[in-house]
Amino acid sequence: MTTASDWIAGSRPRTLPAAVPASTGVAAYVDEPIWWKAFGAMIVSLALQVGVNFANDYSDGVRGTDEDRVGPMRLVGSGAASPRSVKWAAFAAFGVAGVAGLFLAAATDWWLVAIGAVCIVAAWFYTGGKNPYGYLGLGEVMVFVFFGLVAVMGTAYVQTESLAGDALLPSFYAAVAIGALACAILVANNLRDIPSDREVGKRTLAVALGDERTRHLFAFLMLTAAVAVLGIALSTTWWALLGLVYAVPAASAVRIVVGERAGGPGLIPVLAKTGVAELLLGLGLFAGLLLG
């Protein structure tokens, strides 16, 4: 029988997003944050992330690509939960995101419903369907778009109702920073899984690039986040440099990936460190832009 701890582990809380604090900081700097909208956006963001994690668990599990997985437990692949129950958990999470999104759209602009629908479709077809784009090396691109650009700029928009003027550059740079670290999580995950993914024909970007270049890509994404934080500081206030607190766990993660050249189980801590780095970056930007 699947336990609550199994479901929590299956939702992969270490990969949950930090887009809302960053974008709420932008709203605070430009005008005033609308806290109930920030909370609603947080529900949408978290529910979508949990939904895509469960959907990925289900789709990879029924394909058999998780049978020899090295990383954190997968519910279907490990046999801890039935494919049907995990699929319905994904649908439930998408439903929560949809309901919260409808409230935000009703209070902001109805065209946001279309954006939300695209997000859910993209989440399902990451590893779902006959030709999942996650198996075609496009996972990192879509993570950057949806958990970076759409999540951050969308949350900033629902609070400011405009991305023109003073909100445009800081929200874009914040989206790049968060998107880069979200991609880094996926890159580390796929770097670890290169041998097993190659064996089952799952052609991720890491499989296409190979071990060496994937490690360099991870370091590049970590550096990209720092450059983006500097861009925010130049376009708003130097207090935004508080976002660079992310560099503490990020430097440790880069050392493991590039310096120590860890592989297999040795890369599992990198996921946690990168997830913490993303959260710290979001919180640091929130605090800095609020102070500024």
Image (spheres, rainbow, N blue to C red):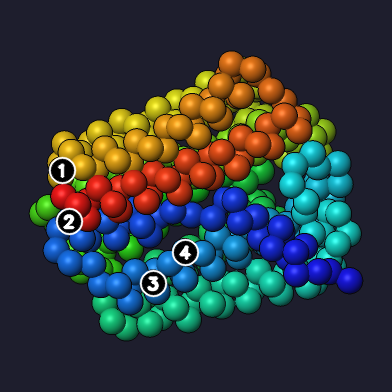
Q: Position of residue 239 (x, y in %)?
A: 21, 42
Sequence-wise, the earlier of marks 2 and 4 is 2
- The amino acid type of the residue labelled 4 equals Ser
Sequence-wise, the earlier of marks 2 and 1 is 2
* Quadrant in the picture for residue 124: bottom right
Sequence-wise, the earlier of marks 3 and 4 is 3
Res. 198 visible in picture = no
State the SS at label 1: loop
Residue 161 is left or right of residue 49, and the answer is left
* Quadrant in the picture for residue 55: bottom right
Residue at (88, 59) in percent of width and height = 79
Q: Which residue is mark 3?
A: 39
Residue 230 is left or right of residue 262, and the answer is left
Contact? badges 2 and 1 (CB < 8 Å): yes
What distance separates the C-alpha of mark 3 from that of mark 1? 25 Å
Q: Position of residue 33 (x, y in %)?
A: 23, 67
Contact? badges 1 and 4 (CB < 8 Å): no
Q: Which residue is mark 2?
A: 29
Q: Position of residue 132 (x, y in %)?
A: 65, 51
Q: Which mark is residue 45?
A: 4
State the SS at label 2: helix
Q: Residues within 10 Å of mark 1 (few under 14, many from 20)?
A: some
Numbered label tally = 4
Residue at (25, 33) in percent of width and height = 230
What distance separates the C-alpha of mark 3 from that of mark 4? 10 Å
- The amino acid type of the residue labelled 2 equals Tyr
What distance separates the C-alpha of mark 2 from that of mark 1? 9 Å
Sequence-wise, the earlier of marks 3 and 1 is 3
Sequence-wise, the earlier of marks 2 and 3 is 2
- The amino acid type of the residue labelled 1 equals Thr
